[in-house]
Amino acid sequence: MTASAGSGLPKDDAKQGGHIAAGYRSAIEGAAVVDRSDRRYVIVSGRAPARMLAGLFSGSLPPDLGEPSASGRRGRMPYSALLTPKGKIVADLRIARLGNGEEGPFLIELPSAGYKAALERMQQYLPPRFARLEEPGEPIGLLTVIGPRAPELLKAAIMELPDPRLSLAELDEGEEVVLEGAAAVPTRIVRTGDVTPPAWDVIAPLPVVHGVQERLGALDAVIAPFELWETLRIERGRPAFGLELDEDVLPPEAGIEDRAIDYRKGCFTGQEFIVRIRDRGKVNRHLRGALLGDATPPAFGTSLFLPDREAPVGETRSAVRSPRFGQSIVLAYVRREIEPPTHLRLGTREGPEAKLRTIDLNGWVLVEGDAAPIA
């Protein structure tokens, strides 16, 4: 899958492509808003949902929400994964608390592409006596507000955030503020690290999300298309389900094990395979980034070659023309023995040059001579 954007920080919105260019500039310098309708939700409640989910998901469950205050309740919405018994990814997800204690219900956020398979897996493994699944009573939406002005505009747009002591900018990735209210699923503001500019997710009943988006637009935040999110995500090097993540991928291949797996917890589905890889084994491929210069962003699944090897050594996933890097870039799976930094070829052994780079928790690892990304 490819997306398109300008080849540098947009200086002329009309020349660079309208909404995406304007949104990109705002995400870097001001505030941009993206409707994240690619997410789905399910509530898990019952006699012991925490204990049941701990044995199913690979990561940590969120701790109890903090005490109510004038600026909301503090909490965490950790990243996790639902795995097959052989450690493959059924879906990645985030987990939020709707109530405290062993019987407190949870809100599970899932990608649309993995929702059906994840729901079937949870229905198969969660005993109804202790944990039951239900759809939220009203539709849930998600907005991501991106950019250095996002905290001030969010506080102005969400009337329930009057406390001047609240600093959304102080939240780390996965930390959240939960607002008290009458809704079964309250409004929550969660710091996300899936893009490089500072960004916060607003998760709330759909009418609330629509109202927040309207007020943000009136406050001069740019309402940007979903393509902006994809551009920023690829520039950050974060994998997405249905593109870099699927049931043929192991968490260590995608580089999400440090975020999605809690090795200190008890048993969870797929643990045996994941621990075996950590302790004694190696995966056959790794998610990498590649700088492509002026080449057209390649289609999903395009092969990558070493010039002296006939068989491909990798294949592309998400690609985009990157304003941040000033060139085309791509996320790709590459065989483990091909160590960055090195040069591959795109499509054929004589194809355009692809400069292979490592991606870690902080994003792309550039080397001397790479074009400096836009800060």
Image: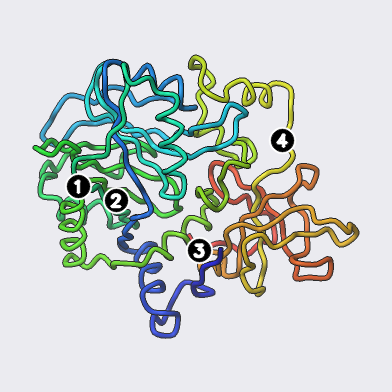
Q: Earlier in the sequence, mark 1 or mark 4?
A: 1
Q: Residues within 10 Å of mark 2 (few under 14, many from 20)?
A: many
Where is mark 2, residue-wise? 142
What is the three-letter code of the residue carrying label 2? Leu
State the mark number for residue 374. Answer: 3
Q: What secondary structure is found at the residue carrying circle 2? A: strand
Give residue 122's position: percent from left, percent from top: 42, 30
Q: What secondary structure is found at the residue carrying circle 3? A: loop
What is the three-letter code of the residue carrying label 4? Val
Report the front residue among 327 and 40: 40
Which quarter of the figure is the N terminus placed in? bottom right
Measured in 3D between alpha carbons, the distance from the residue under mark 3 to the one under mark 1, in whole angstroms, is 35 Å
Establish if 18 lies above or below 265: below
Give residue 111's position: percent from left, percent from top: 42, 47
Q: Earlier in the sequence, mark 3 or mark 1?
A: 1
- Which numbered disc, 4 or 3, marks the residue closer to the eye? 4
